[in-house]
Amino acid sequence: AFSVSTTSNPFYATMAQGVKDEAAALGFDVIILDAQNKIEKQVADVEDALTKNIKVLLINGVDDGAIPLAQKALGKGIPVMALQRNLNPGNMTAFIGTNNVVLGEQLIHWYASTLGGRPSKVLILTGTPGAASSEDRIKGINATLPKYPNIQVLASQTGYYDRAKSLPVAENMLLRFPEAEAILCLNDEMAMGALAAASSMNKRIKITGMDANPDALKAVAEGKLYMTIALPPYDIGRIGVQFARDVLAGKQVQAMKIMDVNFVTEKNVGQFRK
Amino acid sequence: MKMLSRSGLSMFMSRYGSFGVLFVISLAMSLANKSFLTLPNLVNVARQVSINTIISAGMTFIIITAGIDLSVGSLVALSSCVAMIIIEATGSSLLGICTGILIGGAAGAFNGAFVAWAGIPPFIVTLAGLTIYRGIALIITGGTPIIRFEGGFRALGQGALLGIPVPVIIMLIVVLFMHFLLTRTAFGTHVYSVGGNEEASRLSGIKVGKVKFQVYVMGGMLTALAGMVLMGRLSSAQPNTGEGFELDAIATVILGGTSLMGGRGTIWGTLVGAFIIGILNNGFNLMAVDAHFQLVAKGIIILLAVLLDRYLKRKQA
Amino acid sequence: MKMLSRSGLSMFMSRYGSFGVLFVISLAMSLANKSFLTLPNLVNVARQVSINTIISAGMTFIIITAGIDLSVGSLVALSSCVAMIIIEATGSSLLGICTGILIGGAAGAFNGAFVAWAGIPPFIVTLAGLTIYRGIALIITGGTPIIRFEGGFRALGQGALLGIPVPVIIMLIVVLFMHFLLTRTAFGTHVYSVGGNEEASRLSGIKVGKVKFQVYVMGGMLTALAGMVLMGRLSSAQPNTGEGFELDAIATVILGGTSLMGGRGTIWGTLVGAFIIGILNNGFNLMAVDAHFQLVAKGIIILLAVLLDRYLKRKQA
Amino acid sequence: MSGSSESKAETKDSLETPQGASGLSVLGISKGFPGVQALDEVSFSIRRGEVHAILGENGAGKSTLLKILSGALQPDSGRILLDGKEIFLRTPGAASQVGIAAIYQELSLVPWLSVAHNLFLGREWMVGRFLMSKKKLKEKADEVFSLLGLSLDPSAIAGNLGMAEQQLVEISRAFSRNAGFILMDEPTASLTETEINLLFGKIETLKKAGVGILYISHRLEEIFRIADRVTVMRDGKSVYSGAAGELSLPELIARMVGRSIGNHYPKEAIEPGELLLEAKDGVSGEEGLTLSLRQGEVVGLAGLVGAGRTEWARKLFGADPDPKTRFRICGTEVSVSSPRQGRDLGMGMVPENRKEHGLILGRSVLHNITITIMDWLSGFGIVDRKRQSAVSSEYIGKLSIKCPSDTVDISTLSGGNQQKAVLAKWLARKGKIIILDEPTRGIDVGAKLEMYQQMNALCREGKGIILISSDLPELLSMSDRLYVMHEGRFVASLDKKEASQEKILEYASGLNYGQTIRNGSEGI
Ligand SMILES: Nc1ncnc2c1ncn2[C@@H]1O[C@H](COP(=O)(O)OP(=O)(O)OP(=O)(O)O)[C@@H](O)[C@H]1O
Ligand SMILES: Nc1ncnc2c1ncn2[C@@H]1O[C@H](COP(=O)(O)OP(=O)(O)OP(=O)(O)O)[C@@H](O)[C@H]1O
Ligand SMILES: [Mg+2]
Ligand SMILES: [Mg+2]
């Protein structure tokens, strides 16, 4: 079974698709359980699944509340593949995904590299307060910023990972800080919101996102979005299923598979659009 | 006459009392932040509150009949996704927008029919609507947003007329129209009557079911209109947008002095309520308040605002 | 006497009619899926509904007084975060849990005081509470979850007594206690009367404000108790847990036949409502219905369930 | 009761209560509402063991005074004394602690609770301090009812009861408090002779036991039956106070309304015109009588509490549609399926329960009066506000509804004025058949006269009126013909000439059941 945090988000939907496709290719039955971003729903989902004699649990935890679920599954002798959300060593057979703290660090390193030491003022749109991915990415960013004194963060506000909600927030920030050179967004949804805000205020500004969702890629291709980070959700899903096959076959798998990310700009966007 | 003037004043305050609150909040914001009281920012705030106000105008009617509509957020998503699919298919923004609004009307009719004639509590009907419309939006889009950087539909969100943004113009027209409907027409009177005392309205020969049905249809259409504006503003339609819009809209309506128990409320109040919420959000962004702390502060300020409102009304009455 | 028997029967149906709906849904689920009607799965369902039921029991009282509590989700987060911080600091689960529940009571008192004595609409007060408590939870935890794999508090979520999971036992105790309170005590009668006719209650010498205050405090404490169970189940406390719990709880209460207009409702109904929702979720998971389609189906089934309920009641009455 | 020893009351008070300060009194009480001075320096007292009646026009301030004495309202100024000592009644609870019980004009039962729960609401300790068993509750309630000689079902849901039954529950509630003072605001407004006699019997007993009673009523003949003292209020002032019998009824009325009233029941006889309505009682089985109504006629419906008059009228109007019961209205046979259809067929109904069924509380007087004619007042849905306020002013004038302006919330009007507004909305609709269910409930003599004159005017215009009233003298005087109902059936049809109080009561209590049917079938 694959318990995913939410398929309403394209990122996780793609991951689920990867799981589905690979399972079909390998001849596995897979149940996809959508927790709709609610940990209680995920707990219920997995508990329900565990009553059905599943062989492997692939889980993309909504948050750390998924840890006891993994333990429970392991306790029943069911291997657990943690996708994208790390459930801490010992609670999972293998982890496949990216690391949000690292992602935050990489974002700043990348942005600094585009500046070449030139000073730059930026705004940051963070995700839903308390959402682990957002808090981790912020951690990575905050840890890396001191290395680049030329980057000045004017303000950091939450856009709730949501396009419609980040739009007014971005407008307000742009109004207050017209001098900003870039808005760094912790996901593509907010990048699209920021993009709409900039266009409503007739401003051209560098906007970066994360996730490389199809419409973000389209915006990058049209030169509207400065950059988005391509995480490989589809591959995360596929490798998860491959690892599951290996484990069932009694083979050893890598315990921590950190996937590479790509910085997608107008130059290389072609490779990422299907 | 002493009698008349006193009751006149108290009516004024109960209608316009929340203006005092709005004033105080605006004052505080402009003291705390220089950029607040600038024309571009005020236009900005007006544009930002437009979507919520359009939805809340319809919600006001629904709440006055002692109903509620929890499905507005999902309906924003559904109507804009349908509209965008049609625009993508036909290239005609007009066709897309009209279909979008019709979808809104249809969803409203669905809600309304169950509320009015099956006698199911509005909370349950529209909660079911919330999940159904969201599900349909996700199914028809396959869960992915549709983005489109060209087309006339964008004018709805991004255009301007004589310097006034189109969303603001739409909002003003909606507010004026709905105010007129509520205060100057037989329908408006019936809306108040049904919410005030359903049984007495029925016994007075009012078709209670029809009135309820109509307010939901209207609410659905306005919600869809808001969806069109949002689609224009974002140049995209997204199946999971609009989450939490229902709480925003209901809070707006109640902040504006409309009672959840029905029978009372005004569109002006709702407009003021929308601005109170909009200015709070705007101010906090301008001051770049920390996200966690912002939540606490916003809650407290809303409570204080309502307390102030009570105080002003009591003082004057 | 004709009158007596009629009112007796209709009371019976309005109390127990939803059992019929529950039965039909369970039947359908067990036909559609073999694993549904197995003991482990039923225990499973009971455990899954426990948290919502505990919250909804308190919500039932609040809604019977014509109030509402939107802050429950945030309060689950706040109380469990505080409890966990204390457990981490002192190592004492008992101390943590007691503090958590006290925090719930305090937050309830905050809500209740504004509703009862400041006369602010419950919707606004608890909406403010929703953002305030969430904000505090985020601030005290710095936004990150706290995980702890040892300590007695886990028994609350994961333990079992004679094969019955502890959450289920807690739920049953809460339900029985609240039912008793509502039907057998003066306080329960006052809860009904305040919601049914506030003015009449006041004229009968009932301290209306006090009754309202008390139901919110109780609701807060039960919500915190649910937070403790959730914390035990997840071996962790998270500042952003519980979002959307308020809609679930209110829907549960209303599905159970309690009216948002106040004055009517039963705890049994709420229990049945919780099981209807829980069984739907469980059944859909067992059948592995596509997530998008599930939303649509769930909405429709809830509507059908309520229609069936009406039909059964009308038929019998 | 021997408060005289400790009496330090002011001269004014001792003037009011010559035997000392034993009793409940108010001194110089004032109370204003937005737009009205409801009470203006009123002083008044109730001695133990007397019935003190208050008379006054609608809106004179009677209920306001009562509410101040029961702790439901706080006075702006003035003092309240109990046995010479000043007391403060901040809440109704405080009043009941010092032994004051009240029956309010607007019935205040909790609709979804049982009769027994309502009976003991707020003092459940009578049935168990913390725990209440349903059985005990029911037993206690039965005890109370049997003591009062009433047959009410304690487990019935209060909201399902008719007005009269609700009224009886309220009375029982006040009487069972063992209070030293009982304040009654129009307790008999929807009761019939039988219950009134019961009530008066009970009042006599209480008086003997030293209970002081404040009695407000618009049924003036009652005053002479039970009152020891009478106070007349006018525009918030006490204008007369004296022993009962000191002034004659016409004199009292003159004090109340500022003019004398000659004929209390100015019924005009009008030649009946076309047949408007033929109706059965709707009870299946045995053939009952057929009620007929012609243009220009007032047909009265008599019956005991719960006889089914209201139930039948609601069927006729479509409020409780019953497809089995068919009516012949203006020659076409129909079963009315909704009040809207009833209205479109030319009917109007003034319901007995004005608060629940008649008024939209929270809305203006104007809104409430014109609600039935919004279709006439609007073109393309847009309301002609000039005409709207013209209509509302017209009826406010015609019925002399007392209100600061027609934009005030109707819930701020006094009970009687609210009743007039309900009548006004159906007068405005100008239907052919007007059903009046207890139309004069709670309205003063002057207003009653106006209402009767309105009825005459309607008859002159060729309308037919069905009058349901528990006030027998009114029913006898104002109807051209009468039907008596018993257990849902029309059991007798009486002409104005043959009808008398005794005869009606006889039929209504079902004594002459067999005979009635015979008598009745000849009647039509
Ligand atoms: N809550 C209120 N708000 C505003 N005005 C009120 C309120 N209650 C009563 N009034 C006004 O006070 C005056 C006195 O009312 P009150 O109810 O005491 O009259 P009443 O003598 O009992 O009349 P009735 O015989 O019609 O019951 C009326 O003019 C009424 O409109
Ligand atoms: N909505 C209702 N639900 C249940 N029972 C009702 C309802 N309305 C009336 N009844 C019952 O029907 C019977 C007839 O009542 P109805 O009110 O028609 O009598 P009535 O002759 O008008 O007497 P009253 O003087 O009480 O108005 C009563 O026993 C009453 O309790
Ligand atoms: Mg009165
Ligand atoms: Mg009656």
Image (spheres, coloured by chain):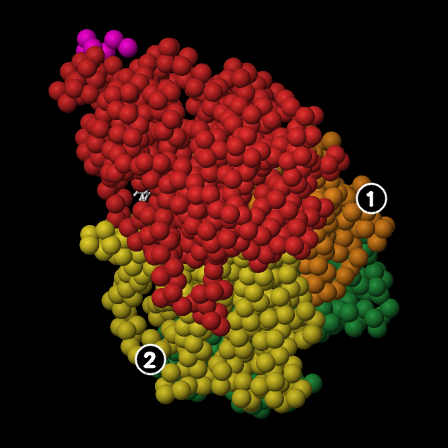
Chain colours: A green, B yellow, C orange, D red
Looking at the image, residue B51 lies above or below residue D263: below
Q: Looking at numbered disc 1 in the image, what kind of residue is underneath it?
A: Thr
Which residue has dot 1 on it? C38
- Tell me, yes or no, whether the highlighted magenta stretch contains residue A110: no
Mark 2 neighbour density, 10 Å: few (under 14) some (14–19) many (20 or more): few
Ligand 1 rendered quadrant = top left
Looking at the image, residue D481 lies above or below residue B294: above
Q: Main secondary structure of the magenta part?
A: helix
Q: Residue at x 83, y 60 (%)?
A: A248
Which residue has dot 2 on it? B40
Looking at the image, residue D166 lies above or below residue D18: below
Q: Residue at x 81, y 51 (%)?
A: C28
Q: Is residue D197 left or right of residue B129?
A: left
Q: Looking at numbered disc 2 in the image, what kind of residue is underneath it?
A: Pro
Q: Residue at x 52, y 15 (%)?
A: D147
Mark 1 neighbour density, 10 Å: few (under 14) some (14–19) many (20 or more): few
Q: Residue at x 37, y 19 (%)?
A: D226
Q: Is residue C125 left or right of residue D87?
A: right
- Tell me, yes or no, whether the highlighted magenta stretch contains residue D2: yes
Q: Nearer the viewer, residue B303 or D320?
A: D320
- In the rendered image, the quadrant that contains the N terminus of chain B is bottom left
Q: Nearer the viewer, residue D197 or B192?
A: D197
Q: Nearer the viewer, mark 2 or mark 1?
A: 2
Q: Is residue D31 left or right of residue B241?
A: left
Residue found at the far left of this picture: D11
Q: Where's residue D266, x and y in %?
A: 40, 40
